[in-house]
Amino acid sequence: MSELHIGSLYWPSTLHNPPSYPSLTECETAQVVVIGGGMSGITCAWELISSGIDVILVEREIVAGESTSANTGLLQYCNDVMLSDLIGQIGRESAETFYVACSRAIDKLADIAASLPQDVGFRRRSSLYYASTEQDLPKLKQEYEALSSCGLRASYWTADDIAAHFPFRKPGAIVTGGDAEVNPFRFVTLLAAQAVDKGLRIREYTEIVKHDSLAGGRHRLHTGNGHHIDANHVIYAIGYEPKELRGELIKPDIGRSFVIVTDPVPDLSQWHERYMIWETARPYLYMRTTEDNRLIIGGLDEEDRNPLQSVQRRKEHSEKLLEKAKALFPDLPLAIAYDWNATFGESEDNLPFVGEDPEWPGVYYTLGYGGNGTVYSLLGAELVRELIQGEADSNPLKDIIGLSRATLREGTPR
């Protein structure tokens, strides 16, 4: 089992005594089995169980214990691939459809968060996407026009506008409205508990070691402790390890990213409306605040897929992130309280993997590659539910993020 993160994580410290669930101790059956107890798996299971579908979710460790704990909780409709670039990649109609769907997904996440019995740190925020250099300004202005033309909430800020609201000056920026932030650990943990109340069966410490096809299109999943689950449909929501994918799909690029969380800051009044902040440079710096006045700062992405083991090198990366934050907010007394680095994945075309396996009927994937994984999880949950219920024909995302799209096939132009 590969490690997905190394370091000291902040989010688990914000919820004490989360519920635990039994492991699989006997053979079971269900309409659907979801594999993975993170953001994608729990959101998918919640969507299915809310529609009256019988679901078992299996997690090899604990719910919200892997990538969810390392998620920085920024919910944005803008993506790692700019809308203007995506238009050139898949066409205007599909690109705008995808971006609008991401915006609507944040609205639905807001409704879900409001339905949970405890606060999960969901707060509506705007985002400041600034030009890292003067050379980035033409592209940024092009992106603003693309966002505005399809009705998304965006405004353009000059260098003077930025300096009037923040203690730093950048060449220009796009401000997007309708974004949000969340505590991903509390969100997933409480959503899982609500889904259990609706009838979801969660089996923690249950690892799937073999997947067989049965007569009549059913599936049998074998666990490491000798039991099995039979189901009509299987959904892999396993983060960054799509080993089960059949066919000749282009595998994602896997890298690692670094995050620090500061001690609480007494006064954040100079941080305009707690905007989430990111930039045009690649890899990019991104920042947000927390309910208890901490800063979350991430970036310094590297191509190595393994989390960094060296304590000294991790410290060097953390200090670099801290210095980048101090350069933007020089008057804030910033000190590192938590730091970690974690695996992340990017697909060849910068879109998530969601849909039915092209060569294995009844097997689905909801893999949220890219920097917008929580939003992708919601899109994936809805699309997979529609596919299982035979209602996906009218959903244009089926062809945009589905696994049969040409950009995921080996041998296609890249």
Image: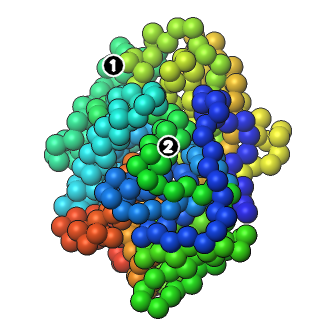
Name of the residue lying farthest toward the bottom: 215
- Within-10-Å neighbours for mark 1: few <14, some 14–19, many 20+: some
Q: Amino acid type of disc 2?
A: Ala
Residue that label 2 marks = 193
Residue 273 in the image: above or below residue 220: above
In the displayed structure image, the side of residue 198 where residue 141 appears, left or right: left
Report the front residue among 316 and 186.
186
Residue 149: x %, y % from top left? 16, 46
Residue located 45% across and 62% down the image: 55
Residue at 72%, 61% (x, y): give it: 2
Secondary structure found at label 1: helix
The residue tagged 1 is 160
* Percent coordinates x, y for residue 323 in the rendering: 65, 26
Query: Between marks 1 and 2, how big is the CA–CA gap?
Result: 47 Å
Farthest-out residue, front: 26
Q: Nearer the viewer, residue 258 or 182?
A: 182
1 or 2: tag closer to the N-terminus: 1
